[in-house]
Amino acid sequence: MNDQKKPKIDLKARLGKKSVSSPSGPSIPPPISVSRPGAIPAPPFSAPRADPFGSSASQAPPPKPQAITVEMSEEVVQEQKKQKKKGYMVAVITLLLGGIVGFMVGGSSETSNQQKVAARDAGELAKEVTTATDSAEQLADVVKSVKEKIASGKYPEEEAKKLGGLRIPFEGSNLGLRVIGRFNKDVNRSLVAFAGMSEKANELTEDVQRMLSGSKKALDDAFSLKDKPKIVWSAIVGQGASGPWATLVSLPEGFLVKSDEKVGGKDYSWPESTKMKLAGKETTVKRYGRGDPAGGDPQFIPIDPVSQNGVCPNINVTRIVRSVQDLEEALRGVKDTGGSGEETGLIETGRAVADKLKGIGKQ
């Protein structure tokens, strides 16, 4: 087909556009609008037009979603930050208030539980202190009997056996794992004091019981002197730095002051001589009879046992009597006699603290 027979196409009429006039030349049609991929067509949303050359135009791909950016002023951004900060503060305050309320409720509950435990412990301790105080009174009665028998010159054999099984069942460990912190200071001090006094009384009881068991023979010999006095000390007179003086010497084998028994068919009499150690040597020494006691060979003079006990009491008896006295004072206390002072004993302390603990247990 030659160019002359080709139909002319009026593009201006076809496109419905006006030509743009150029002041210096012929009119130039405006550029054809080309749709960009993803662009939103201007209304009206008409269907795609047919290809003017008679061929089907390929349809444009569907537009992709575009991110919408919203620009906000600085005032809006700051306001949002303020609101977000307020939200955080409200959350924190709510959390703190919840924690404080929970702590107060929990603390109140814990305090109530501790008070209940303290009341229970007070009741249990009252029973334990009462039991210990009863044991202390039994022990005090036995100690009193020991004193009476020793004073009468008899060995307290039955009491010595009882002391072996008598102990006060209270010590510092009884206070362990107990809520005594809820008790008042006076009760706490009394409890600690009672525990210490109980332990001391038990130690003294062991000492007395041990001395009584290990000194039976010595005590029997000492007690026998009351009915049958025996001479166990003597004096040997010799020359001193400025004249005669006496040296005390114990007799290895003492002898009775007097006896109704006959010896070899004769009435009882003191021995004429005895063996003793002088200057590290065992020597036979005659008993002094008459003459100058400092002249010649050494002679011994018997010492009156009554004066001896007044000046040099039997050490075994003295130690036991002192220990028994200490134990009795620890149990019963010391009464004020002539300004010597007064001390509360274990028994009185135990009764008082038991009453206080019972009062706490009732609460």
Image (spheres, grey):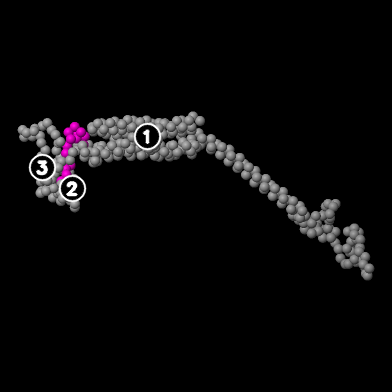
Q: Residue at x 58, y 38 (%)?
A: 105
Q: Look at the picture and state if 1 lies above or below 85.
A: below
Whole-percent x and y of residue 257? Answer: 15, 36
Q: How many marks?
A: 3
Whole-percent x and y of residue 140? Answer: 33, 32
Q: Amino acid at mark 1?
A: Thr
Q: Amino acid at mark 3?
A: Arg
Density class for disc 3 (Cα within 10 Å; few <14, some 14-19, many ≥20) is few
Q: Residue at x 53, y 38 (%)?
A: 110
Residue beneath disc 1: 337
What residue occupies the far left of the structure in this picture?
A: 265
N-term mark: 3 or 1: 3
Q: Quadrant of residue 213?
A: top left
Q: Quadrant of residue 269?
A: top left
Q: Nearer the viewer, residue 248 or 62?
A: 248
Q: Quadrant of residue 106?
A: top right
What whole-number distance in Å separates the C-alpha atoms at marks 3 and 1?
A: 51 Å
Residue beneath disc 2: 245
Secondary structure category for the residue under label 3: loop
Secondary structure category for the residue under label 1: loop
What residue occupies the far bottom of the structure in this picture?
A: 24
Q: Nearer the viewer, mark 3 or mark 1?
A: 3
Q: Quadrant of the N terminus?
A: bottom right
Density class for disc 2 (Cα within 10 Å; few <14, some 14-19, many ≥20) is some
Q: Which residues are magenta?
A: 222-236
N-term mark: 2 or 3: 2
Query: CB atoms at circles 2 and 3 under 8 Å apart?
Result: no
What residue occupies the far top of the structure in this picture?
A: 362
What whole-number distance in Å separates the C-alpha atoms at marks 2 and 3?
A: 17 Å
Residue beneath disc 3: 290
